[in-house]
Image: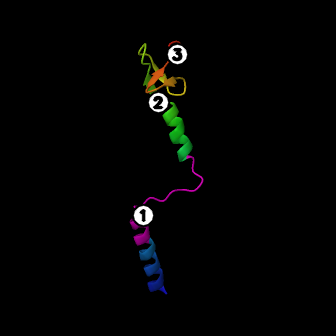
Amino acid sequence: MILKILLLIAFLYIVYRLFGGKVEIPFSNKKNNDKEIDQNTLVECCKCGVYITKKEANKKGNCYYCQECS
């Protein structure tokens, strides 16, 4: 009986290591946090050089513009 438990634990460990040890928690808010962090990234206005967050900036082509410059 103990041998079966040890073999099961060894099997589960091997499967865990095969997948890189990355076990994702279901229903986690990680994707929402990544999007929020991306929106709060500072970018430079191409015209005046002021730094603003991506969610406040207006993007035209490859450039970001502040409210006054757009």
Q: Secondary structure at mark 1?
A: loop
Q: How many marks?
A: 3
- Most extreme residue toward the front, as rendered? 61
Tell me, yes or no, whether the two marked residues, 1 and 2, touch with CB atoms within 8 Å. no
Crowding at mark 2 (Cα within 10 Å: few <14, some 14-19, many 20+): few
- Residue tagged 1: 19
- The disc labelled 3 sits on which kind of residue? Ser
Q: Is residue 23 magenta?
A: yes
Residue 22 x %, y %: 44, 58
Q: Residue at x 41, y 16 (%)?
A: 49
Which residue is located at x 42 percent, y 61 percent?
21
Q: Earlier in the sequence, mark 2 or mark 3?
A: 2
Please state the horizontal and vertical placement of residue 31, each as a whole percent of the image: 54, 45
Relative height, residue 46 to residue 37 (above, below): above
From mark 3 to mark 1, how far is it between C-alphas? 47 Å
Q: For residue 6: magenta?
A: no
Disc 3 or 1, which lies upstream in sequence? 1
